[in-house]
Image (cartoon, grey):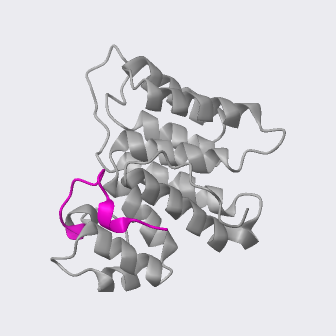
Amino acid sequence: MMRQNELTKVTAELAAVICADIELGEEARALLIPAMTPAAFLQRLIEKQLFVDAIKFIARALPKREASWWACLCAHSVLAVKPDPKASRALELAGKWVYQPSEENRRLTYQAAEATGFAHPASWAAMAAYWSGGSLAPAEAPPVPPADKLTAQAVAGAVMLAAVHGEPEKAAEKYRRFLEQGIDIACGGNGRVQDASA
C-alpha cells in the first residue's frame, strides 16, 4: 500500500530538518524524535490520523515541482462536471509549469490564481508554481525571491482545501487518498494511484 521506506524524492535525511519551518500541531510535534527519518515520522503521523500535519510534511519534503504536481492532482479531483473556467485555467497553467518550468510559465500562474479569488484548490496549485522560484517583483524590477517554504504552504493549502471542497463530510477519506498520492510521488511515482474505494 504505502511505501514510506522508499521516499526516493525526499532528500532530507532527518524529519526534523523538514519540520523546521512547518506549523505542526502539538501532537505531531510530540511525535518528532531528533534522529527520526522522514519515512518514520510520516508513518507515525498517518498512524495517529494526523492527516493535516502529514500533508504539510509531505508538501515541504517534496521537491517543488513534484509538490506542485501533487497540488494539481488534488485540485483536479474536485473540479465539477461543469468546472469554473477560471479554476480550470489556473489548474491548466499550474500543470503547464510542472511540465515546462520556465519563468514565463511560472509568471502566468499568478494572474490565473488571482482571477479565481484564491477560493479554489486550483488557485493554490497555481500559487505553488508561482512561489517556486524566480522573482515576485515585476520582470523589469530588481528580483525579490519568494521565501523557500511558500510553495509547500500553497501545496498544503491546495490539498487541504480539496479535501473539504464540495463534500466536507468526506474529508477524512479524501485526506487518506491524497496522502496515498503524495507518498506515491515521493516514491518516484506519478501520483495517479487507484482509488481503493472505487
**Magenta stretch, main secondary structure class:** loop
Location of residue 91 in the rendering, given as x and y in whole percent from the top left corner: 61, 35
Q: In this view, does 159 lie to the left or right of 34?
A: right
**Residue nearest the viewer, comparing 138 with 105:** 105
Pick out the residue farthest to the right.
82
In depth, the one of 195 and 98 nearer the eye is 195
From this viewpoint, is residue 118 visible? no
The residue positioned 45% from the left and 55% from the top of the image is 184
Residue 83 vs residue 5: left or right?
right
Residue at left 43%, top 51%? 185
Whole-percent x and y of residue 14? 19, 67
Quadrant containing the C terminus in the rendered view: bottom right
How far across and how far down the image is residue 119, in percent? Answer: 66, 47
User: What span is colored magenta in the figure?
Assistant: 1-16
Position in image of residue 16 (x %, y %): 22, 69
Res 111 → quadrant: top right
Does residue 11 appear in the picture of this structure? Answer: yes
Q: Which residue is drawn at 42% across and 53% down?
A: 153
In this rendering, the answer to whether 135 lies above or below 126 is above
The number of callouts visible is 0
Q: Nearer the viewer, residue 108 or 65?
A: 65
